Image (tube, grey):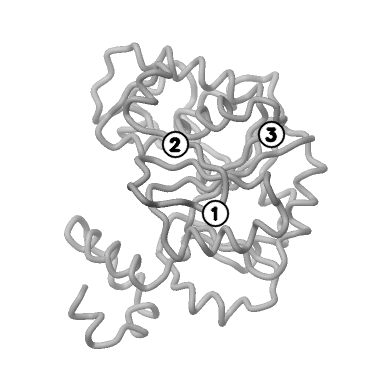
Amino acid sequence: MKTVVAIRTNKWTVNEQRVFQQLSPILGNNLKVVFHNRPAGVVPPMECVDISNSVMSEMGLHVISDWGWRCGDYAYYALRAAYPVFDNYMLVEPDVYFSGDPTAFFDHLATISNDIVALRLGDFDPKHRFARRVGPVPPKRAIFALTRFSGRALDRAYALRKTYSTQNIPDFVYSNDEVFVFSNLLADTTLTVADLAEVAPEWFEGAQFDTAPDLLSEHVDQDYHGKNKILHPVVDREFFKKALAKRMVGRTGVLSQSSRALSAMSAQEMDDI
């Protein structure tokens, strides 16, 4: 089973470089990058699939203002189109951290033939704005930062997303990647499913893999050195400062989640935040 793995990003920072350095010795040329609106002069150290508003429109996909963030499945369809010969396709976001030697993890994945492989597959709140207009299927989710799909699963999702793109759905409730993909594909009983928490539990037990809070890479380096774990979201200091400042504007409760990372900030960095 041939698998292509791609980093999904819209910039190239120490976080993307870290994932590249962690995975390139294992994956070689089967590691790519899907780059949303790549800045001029940025040359990643591997083959690049460039995506943009015009590329998505040409692929028959609805371009909402934040599709680069909200619709990670668009990156999958572009990756599949660029490299159609692979059996499986995997996206890794730059704030996924592979501790220890991830060789065994990818060797194990190579033995699994399931069409859908993700972490914490489950039900989703039907009242959430991304689930309100997902269609006549039960709303489902998984953490989209580390997922794998077979070629046939992506072909089905792509066809459904193109049809969905033609419907008169307000942008505010236009379904995001995890809700659209998992709701529709898990409703397809011909596709096989595997949850990473069950097929590779040792990689996630005792390590955070969730949507928040952000973990500083320096703390993860310290706490998990030499241990075979996969964590998320893990970022460098600069990303943490910018992300925290943006979140503080929009919602409360963020500071209490980030007390350890905040205690590592210098006075100057706190002023920056």
Instruction: Tell me if label 1 and label 2 are in contact, CB under 8 Å.
Output: no
Give the numbered dot on residue 50.
2
Mark 1 highlights which residue? 45
Query: What is the CA distance from the residue labelled 2 to the residue labelled 3?
Result: 20 Å
Instruction: Decide if residue 245 is on the left or right side of residue 123.
Output: left
Q: 202 or 67: which is nearer to us?
A: 67
- Callout 1–callout 3 Cβ contact below 8 Å: no
How many C-alpha atoms fall within 10 Å of the one at disc 3: few (<14), some, or many (≥20)?
many
Which structural element holds mark 3? strand
Q: Amino acid at mark 3?
A: Asn
Q: Point out the residue furthest to the bottom here.
A: 267
Q: Quadrant of the C terminus?
A: bottom left
Between 188 and 144, the one lying in front of the other is 144
Sequence-wise, the earlier of marks 1 and 3 is 1
The image shows residue 170 at horizontal and vertical percentages of: 24, 22
| Residue 233: percent from left, percent from top | 47, 60
> Mark on residue 88?
3
Query: Residue, x 27% and y 29% (percent of image)?
Result: 64
Figure quadrant of the N terminus: top right
Which residue is pictured at 45% across the width and 33% down the height? 179
Q: Nearer the viewer, mark 2 or mark 3?
A: 2
> Helix or strand or loop: what does disc 1 sit on?
loop
For the point 70% across and 59% down, the residue is 25
Give the residue type at disc 2: Asp
Q: Nearer the viewer, residue 38 or 63?
A: 38
Q: Relative to 15, is 156 above or below?
A: above
Q: Extreme right residue here?
A: 111
Number of on-image labels: 3
